[in-house]
Image (cartoon, rainbow, N blue to C red):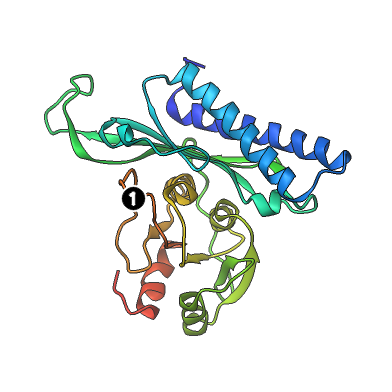
């Protein structure tokens, strides 16, 4: 794996973790394991596999994972993998559902102006530079390279995707202002990828997420030419000390201005 670039390595991690999760789910369900036991088994296995691969093939990089204690060393690191080993544990625990995902993203600190990339002259700022989101139950992985084909424009009302369990007030405002059709899906990765794949046009979330929930989906969506931001139009910033990043918009670029206008903001 040392010969893989970061894009391919992210795809490898997301795809292989997904395959193992599908095998684990099938095996445990056959044995009558459901609910929290199934969720916990998936989280643990995925975290263990990913950390073993990162330790072996990217030992100098820091990691921020939903399934591990945060380490402040990542704040001074030049490269940080932001991962969600199993996004959508509830959907994973329901054998008939496929709206769960694996998120792998790499954040890298900017090289300062005039510095060669090997000189270690870095700034305090950084950005997501590689990512992959796998949808294991449908055997699909979307990556930053090659980037997904930009989704074709949808004829008809915009399609808005929200959580299975709650409809944010902001989503209701946008749906009413733009005359949206609405649908519900599970994991953040599945919802964001539904926009990347052209199945939906807007994914709007408020009320609670962490950096690992959106880092990989946002990077892949950006690679596909989609708009990504906070719901006030400000940028999504990663590898911040506080992992809380509670809201986001992922949408077709031509819908960004109408969505933000409906929320009382300008692009």
The answer to whether residue 1 is left or right of residue 121 is right
Q: Is residue 99 visible?
A: no
Q: How many marks?
A: 1
**How far from the left and from the top, in percent, is residue 40?**
67, 42
**How far from the left and from the top, in percent, is residue 248?**
42, 61
Q: Assign the C terminus to one quadrant of the image.
A: bottom left
Quarter of the rendering containing residue 44: top right
- Residue located 61% across and 34% down the image: 46
Q: Is residue 29 visible?
A: yes
Q: Secondary structure at mark 1?
A: loop
The vertical placement of 202 against 171, above or below, is: above
The vertical placement of 53 against 247, above or below, is: above
Quarter of the rendering containing residue 31: top right
**How far from the left and from the top, in percent, is residue 137?**
72, 44
Q: Which residue is mark 1?
A: 242
The vertical placement of 232 against 238, above or below, is: below
- Residue located 39% across and 80% down the image: 262
The answer to whether residue 41 is left or right of residue 12 is right
**How far from the left and from the top, in percent, is residue 222?**
42, 50
The answer to whether residue 211 is left or right of residue 102 is left
The answer to whether residue 65 is left or right of residue 99 is left
- Residue located 34% across and 54% down the image: 236
């Amino acid at each position: 794996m040392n010969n893989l670039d970061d894009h391919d390595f992210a795809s490898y991690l997301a795809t292989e973790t997904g395959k193992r999760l599908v095998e684990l789910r099938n095996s445990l369900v056959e044995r009558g394991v459901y609910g929290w036991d199934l969720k916990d088994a998936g989280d643990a296995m995925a975290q263990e596999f990913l950390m073993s691969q990162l330790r072996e093939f990217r030992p100098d990089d820091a990691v921020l994972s939903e399934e591990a204690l945060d380490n402040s060393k990542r704040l001074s690191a030049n490269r940080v993998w932001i991962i969600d080993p199993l996004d959508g544990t509830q959907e994973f625990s329901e054998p008939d559902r496929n709206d769960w995902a694996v998120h792998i993203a790499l954040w890298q600190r900017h090289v300062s102006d005039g510095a060669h990339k090997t000189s270690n002259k870095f700034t305090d700022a950084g950005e997501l530079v590689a990512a992959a989101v796998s949808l294991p139950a449908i055997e699909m992985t979307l990556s930053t390279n090659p980037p997904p084909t930009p989704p074709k424009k949808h004829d008809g009302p915009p399609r808005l995707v929200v959580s299975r369990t709650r409809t944010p007030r902001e989503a209701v405002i946008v749906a009413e202002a733009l005359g949206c059709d609405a649908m519900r899906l599970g994991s953040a990765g599945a919802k964001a990828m539904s926009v990347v794949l052209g199945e939906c046009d807007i994914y709007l979330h408020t009320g609670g997420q962490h950096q690992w929930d959106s880092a990989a989906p946002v990077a892949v969506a950006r690679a596909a030419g989609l708009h990504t931001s906070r719901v006030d139009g400000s940028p999504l910033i990663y590898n911040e000390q506080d992992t809380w990043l509670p809201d986001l918009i992922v949408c077709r670029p031509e819908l960004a201005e109408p969505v933000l206008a409906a929320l009382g903001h300008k692009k």
